[in-house]
Amino acid sequence: MNLQDFKFSRDKWQKEFTLALRQRVNDYFQTNNISKYANAAMVTKTVVLIGAFAALYAAIITGWVATPWLAILAWITLGIVTAGIGFSVMHDANHGAYSRNKYVNGVLGWVINLIGGFSVNWKIQHNTLHHSFTNVHGMDEDIDAGKLLRFSPEQEHLWFHRFQHLYAWFLYSLMTHMWITTKDFKQLFRYRNNGLLEQHSISFAGAFSHLLLVKVVYYAYLLVIPLVFSPFAWWVTLIGFLLMHSALGFLLGCVFQTAHVMESSHFPAADEDGNLEYNWAVHQLMTTTNYAPGNRLLSWFVGGLNYQVEHHLFPNICHIHYRKLSQIVSETAKEYNLPYKSLPTFREALRIHWRMLKTLGNGATVLPVAA
């Protein structure tokens, strides 16, 4: 099916919930006279993260680190900081949530190109497909990892999936290795073929030229320049670069998959006419899980993505506000007898995700949904 073939429910009760929730969130910002965009704390975080990235990069290419092992450690730390920039700065900007100024969002959103991705593809995959059709098989590419991983009960079950709860973590570490090599090119051709580029008024020729330029710049500054200027042997730089991406991919996989591939998650399927069971807002409640709401350090690093419910309901609001909004969302959901899924710790979220991978790997097609 195409995007336009799907129709969310128009159920009156769900519509009343959606309207009430939006009104209460709007009232929160108006009553407190605050902007839904970034505040001083968010700007400070942006400066800290980008500054840390620049400092680590400078240390690597100038030899400020004294030994090869410290250089490799600096590369791994660079991967962790890169994840923080992606979670916090780039993510909000590409949702138009960082600033009311579209040029600020454009510049900060373009940062994804400097950390291995491609902004054109990311916006289509994440903003359009994932946020519109969360956990819908065949539409949400976040639950489509090819044949190696089975993230959905509708996906074909293969014999080796019984081991996916063991090997998935290694595959997560390869995620951005795929970004910087083949994925972006395959994705761009796929979006051309299925009409998504045209729907977004994007020229394939222009996007392809842009993608080539992005990859050349990325490899030039993050691999070639360190190879040329680092005082250490070439293999130190190469190992460091590979480990940086392994750390980055592993963190991205753990943070995002624990929000949707969970025992409490629904995997809604449309009927033959494209009708979905829930309206868009309730769909997000049914398919999304929060975790570690009391862990402020984790929340700071992952850009509020431990509040995935709030992010999916209000992607155009800067994540710096999610902690406050979570009380409004949970209370409104309870009032309308709708689920609000939240786990106490990140460790618990990882444990349940592991168990869910095992369940899906054993071939389950009907899942026992936990509230």
Image (cartoon, rainbow, N blue to C red):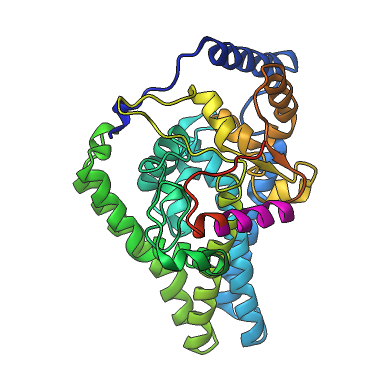
- Where residue 72 sits in the image (x, y, percent)? 60, 79
- One can see residue 315 in this view: no
Q: Nearer the viewer, residue 269 or 17?
A: 269
Q: Magenta includes 193?
A: no
Q: Residue at x 57, y 17 (%)?
A: 18
Q: Residue at x 44, y 68 (%)?
A: 160
Q: Magenta includes 356?
A: yes
Would you say 87 lies left or right of 147 here?
right
The magenta span reads 346-358
Q: Residue at x 63, y 73 (%)?
A: 74
- Dividing the picture into quadrants, the one containing residue 28 is top right
Measured along the vertical axis of the image, is residue 140 above or below residue 328? below
**Main secondary structure found in the magenta portion:** helix
Q: Nearer the viewer, residue 269 or 255?
A: 269
Measured along the vertical axis of the image, is residue 199 above or below residue 302? above
Q: Residue at x 57, y 12 (%)?
A: 13
Would you say 45 lies left or right of 361 here?
right
